[in-house]
Image (cartoon, rainbow, N blue to C red):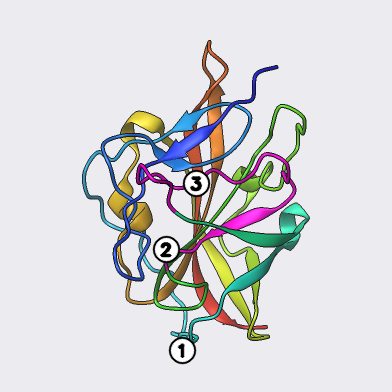
Amino acid sequence: MTPRTCRHRSRRGGRTAALAGSAALVAALTASGCSARADGATSPPPAADVTPVSALAASVPDRIAIPDIHVDAPLGEVGLAADGTMRTPPFDRPKEADWYKEGPTPGEPGPATIVGHMDTAETPKAVFHDLARLKKGERIEVHRKDGAGAVFAVDSVDTFKKDAFPTQKVYGATERPELRLITCGGSLTKDRHWDSNVVVFAHLTGKA
């Protein structure tokens, strides 16, 4: 089977994950090429009714846990390739996810981004296989190298077609600390590519 890929165009924008582009936006993922293209700015999802919590200082994340979908995985890092796209998480570690290191660290103000495979040619159930099953309010924990755990609550889970990917909604700057989890999804095309991205929107609720 030919490995399938999922790509995202990414441009560095300070400490925010301002991933843009008219070409495929790569959330890198899975055995089935999934691409996303920016189609203009969209308002961020509405804030949940929660008491504001203080942002954390910068610290590189090293593990993610999502109890409701049985994820407990190490975190690596991905940056930008020479062509300005986000690098694809390595296919040889499908059970691990990766933090996008050109953006905020989880717990800082802004939308920290973590990407992972849904599947690969060799691994039908990769780290973010069940991401689309998450529901509002469910818990995401990101451990950081400073010893602090950033705890997030899911705001929404959306699936966006690659030709209608809302770049600003997903990657645009936010005042509060937020988190984006991204994988491939939707339907397989005739050439065995996923036609969409699954995106989880979450906000910081405290420290573990």
Is 190 situated left or right of 104 in this image? Answer: right
Reading the image, the residue beneath label 3 is 87
Give the CA distance from mark 1 to mark 3: 31 Å
As drawn, the residue found furthest toward the front would be 82
Q: Position of residue 96 (x, y in %)?
A: 71, 53
Circle 1 residue: 54
Instruction: Write down the region rendered in magenta.
Output: 80-103
Image-based side of 134 in relation to 34, left or right: right
Query: Is residue 141 in view from this perspective?
Result: no
* Badge nearest the viewer, 1 or 3: 3
> Was residue 56 drawn as part of the magenta stretch in this picture?
no
Q: Which residue is found at the position 28% from the left and 42% from the top? A: 21
Identify the amino acid type marked 2.
Glu
| Residue 24 screen position, x and y as percent | 37, 34
How many C-alpha atoms fall within 10 Å of the one at disc 2: few (<14), some, or many (≥20)?
many
N-terminal label among 2 and 3:
3
Residue 146 spot, x, y in % from top left: 63, 86
Task: Please give the name of the residue rendered at 46% of the width and 37% of the height, measured from the top-left corner.
Answer: 7
**What numbered label is drawn on residue 104?**
none
The residue carrying mark 2 is 102
Q: Residues within 10 Å of mark 1 (few under 14, many from 20)?
A: some
